[in-house]
Image (tube, grey):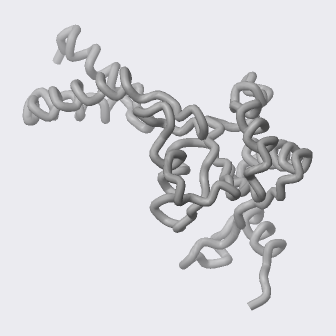
Amino acid sequence: MATSRLIGRLIESLRCLPGVGPKSAQRMAFHLLEHNRDGGRQLAEVLGLAMDKVGNCSECRTLSEETICSLCRNYRRDRSLLCVVETPADVQALEQSTGFQGLYFVLMGHLSPLDGIGPEALGLDLLESRLASGQVKELILATNPTVEGEATAHFVSEMARAHGVRPTRIAHGVPMGGELEYIDGGTLLHAFAGRQEI
């Protein structure tokens, strides 16, 4: 069956989402057109609003409708603790799971010289000015445990030390419910090296 040009554009547009291939995009498009046109209209409206109104917090760089996000505006949070993450999704995950009461700084990626992503692309000048302010006492590095994430954590930890701020790294190790025989060697190495007294 040949699809109309507009349906084809809808399918192609849905493919911009991560993990959505041609078949998934086609299923989504046909579902909206066949069964949920009101949902599709609402999605289009909210998507348009979000694209126009959501920007980055001027302090932590997370996604926000406001110039300064609600976390940075909350003066009950501990301003001496600053957690560095790669994405706004990481902030969400930590907020939902940890009870962390400090503030965040979102890099919006990681150092990757091969991809042309250097310190300036990650807003490290803004991070450095926060470290220089003297308010931050501990910088918690919560970048991903990838080669790029580790390189980024090392680079940022050196920056923190230069400003007299104590850098720490979140622990990496065996997940709850995990079995050692199924854990990769790098994770086991980190877990073994970071063992604690009980």
Q: Quadrant of the N terminus?
A: top left
In the image, residue 91 above or below residue 189: above
Is 6 rendered above or below residue 26?
above
- Residue 181, quarter of picture: bottom right
**Camera-side residue of 133 and 184:** 133
The residue positioned 10% from the left and 29% from the top of the image is 37
Is residue 124 depicted above or below 195 in this figure?
A: above
- Which sits in the foreground, 71 or 43? 71
Residue 190 on image: x %, y %: 78, 67
- Relative horizontal placement of residue 162, taking residue 177 as reference (left or right): right
Q: Tell me residue 182's x, y (percent).
A: 63, 71
Position in image of residue 22 (x %, y %): 35, 28
Q: Image check: 195 left or right of 56?
A: right
Please report the residue visible at 67 percent of the width from the left and 48 percent of the height from the top. Answer: 84
Q: Quadrant of residue 34?
A: top left
Residue at image coords 70%, 62%: 170
Seen as rendered, the residue at the extreme bottom is 198
Residue in view at x 81 percent, y 56 percent:
167
